[in-house]
């Protein structure tokens, strides 16, 4: 079996040159969730193109002016994965809410800190992992916001995680080695 790697934009195409049986075994073993971009057959050999998004990372400092970088980051991910513009806007909103909370509340005032954002996709879903070294805070442990109350009657806070929970399919928090880790997944 011969394996070639080709990159076009942010998409890596992994090309297998082998028999059909070896091709099936290799793709199932190594890339069970990767979208198949296409097959081409010559005699008894088949070529399989598997498209995978290269992981994208963005590191921001805890400065609210850096939040505007998220839009370009999401646009690049949408281009890599073929996400439609309306879903990209929703993902941007969810990510912006999570990152804004880190920037505003994770670090003591006057302290320089960072927010590390990594996006991965297997073609079936996109996963955002937001990591910071700030004070421990589990947004998933917060009570659901009561959106039935009027603005005057509703306590301040809680709407950001409400939006994140309603946009994303899965939201998980963990605290590992002094870091807050928020994983948000959305099926494509």
Image (cartoon, rainbow, N blue to C red):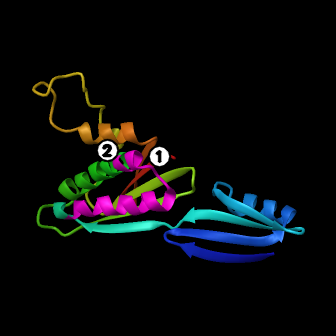
For marks 2 and 1, the one nearer the N-term is 2
SS for dot 2 = helix
Q: Which quadrant is the N terminus positioned in?
A: bottom right
What is the span of residues highlighted in magenta in the rendered image? 66-89
Q: Nearer the viewer, residue 92 or 184?
A: 92
What type of secondary structure mainly makes up the magenta span? Answer: helix
Q: Is residue 44 left or right of residue 26?
A: right
Please say whether residue 63 is visible from this viewpoint.
Answer: no
Q: Nearer the viewer, residue 119 or 182?
A: 119
Residue 99, quarter of picture: bottom left
Look at 34% across and 39% down and name the residue there.
141
SS for dot 1 = strand
Q: Is residue 182 left or right of residue 48?
A: left
Residue position marked by numbered label 1 in the rendering: 186
Crowd rating for badge 1 (residues with CA inside 10 Å; few <14, some 14–19, many 20+): some
- Checking the image for residue 29, the label placed there is none
Look at 44% across and 66% down and name the residue there.
56
Crowd rating for badge 2 (residues with CA inside 10 Å; few <14, some 14–19, many 20+): some
- Checking the image for residue 139, the label placed there is 2
Mark nearer the viewer, 2 or 1: 1
Question: Distance of mark 2 from mark 1, alpha carbons?
Answer: 18 Å
Look at 42% across and 42% down and name the residue there.
168
Residue 149 image position (x, y, % from top left): 19, 22
Residue 164, quarter of picture: top left
Q: Nearer the viewer, residue 15 or 108?
A: 15
Residue 106 image position (x, y, % from top left): 23, 57
Residue 179, quarter of picture: bottom left
Residue 129 image position (x, y, % from top left): 41, 57
């Amino acid at each position: 079996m011969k394996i070639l790697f080709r990159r076009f934009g942010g998409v890596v195409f992994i090309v297998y040159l082998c028999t059909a049986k070896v091709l099936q075994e290799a793709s199932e073993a190594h890339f069970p969730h990767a979208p198949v971009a296409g097959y081409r057959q010559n005699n008894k050999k088949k070529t399989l193109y598997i498209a995978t998004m290269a992981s994208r990372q963005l590191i921001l400092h805890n400065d609210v002016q850096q939040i505007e970088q998220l839009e370009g980051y999401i646009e690049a991910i949408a281009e890599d994965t073929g996400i439609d513009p309306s879903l990209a806007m929703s993902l941007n909103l969810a990510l912006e809410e999570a990152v804004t909370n880190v920037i505003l509340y994770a670090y003591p005032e006057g302290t320089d800190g960072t927010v590390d954002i990594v996006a991965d996709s297997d073609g079936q879903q996109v996963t955002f992992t937001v990591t910071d070294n700030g004070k421990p805070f589990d947004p998933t442990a917060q009570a659901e916001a009561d959106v039935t109350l009027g603005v005057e009657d509703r306590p301040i806070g809680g709407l950001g995680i409400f939006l994140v929970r309603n946009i994303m399919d899965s939201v998980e928090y963990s605290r590992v080695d002094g870091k807050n880790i928020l994983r948000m997944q959305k099926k494509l």
